[in-house]
Every structure is written in C-alpha cells, then in structure tokens.
Amino acid sequence: MSHRLIIRPEAEAEMAEAFDWYEDRVPGLGSDFLLSVDAVIRAVLGNPEQYPQVHRNVRIALVRRFPYEVFFVADDTRIVILSVFHAKRNPKRWQERI
C-alpha cells in the first residue's frame, strides 16, 4: 500500500537547522545528513509498522550515522513526520506537537 507523506513544517525546520549545523562543520556533511534522513523516511514509507511505538500512536525510526530520530504517526493512507529530533534533546518538545 502506498502512503501519502506529510512532513510537518517543524520537522522541515529541524532538518534545515541540522543541515546548516553539519554543513558549517564539514562541507558536504549536511548533504550526507539529508540523504540519511531520506533513507529513513523511505524505509518508513515501505513498512511503518516495523518501527516501535514510543508514545500513544507515535513511532520512532533512528537515523543511521547521525544522532537523530524521526518521530511519525501512520494510518492506512498517510504518514505524518512530526519531528526530526536530535537524540540528546528533551523529548517533551516533540510531544507538544501531538
């Protein structure tokens, strides 16, 4: 089944902020970050139920190579990316978006 992907503006802003941070440290690393996030999102689209639920109906997928987590909700027709969140941040911040 094909899901419609929705990325919340807050998640887009988090990805842009992380891209800028990594790109300022090492040119090209920001692009590597975005490719890693894209790979996780494609995997989520393929089988969202394989990822554990962490809060109510929110699921989590870990980004490889970078300390980020993708929080999302899924139903029969769509997947909503709530947050692309640094693993060391306070989780209360993404929980406010539910």
Image (cartoon, rainbow, N blue to C red):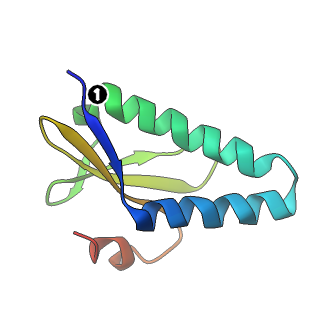
Residue 63 image position (x, y, % from top left): 53, 45
Foreground residue, 5 or 65?
5
Residue 91 image position (x, y, % from top left): 38, 73
Looking at the rendering, which quadrant does residue 71 occupy?
Answer: bottom left
Residue 43 image position (x, y, % from top left): 41, 30
Q: Mark 1 highlights which residue? A: 47
Q: Quadrant of the N terminus?
A: top left
What's the residue type where badge 1 is placed? Asn
* Residue at image location 43% in from the left, 38% down from the top: 41
Foreground residue, 94 or 9?
9
In this rendering, is residue 43 above or below 25? above
Q: Position of 42 compared to 21: left or right?
A: left
* Residue at image location 62% in from the left, 45% down from the top: 34
* Residue at image location 14% in from the left, 41% down from the top: 75
Q: Position of 31 compared to 8: left or right?
A: right
Residue 38 image position (x, y, % from top left): 53, 38
Judging from the image, what secondary structure is the residue with disc 1 in? loop
Foreground residue, 52 or 44?
44
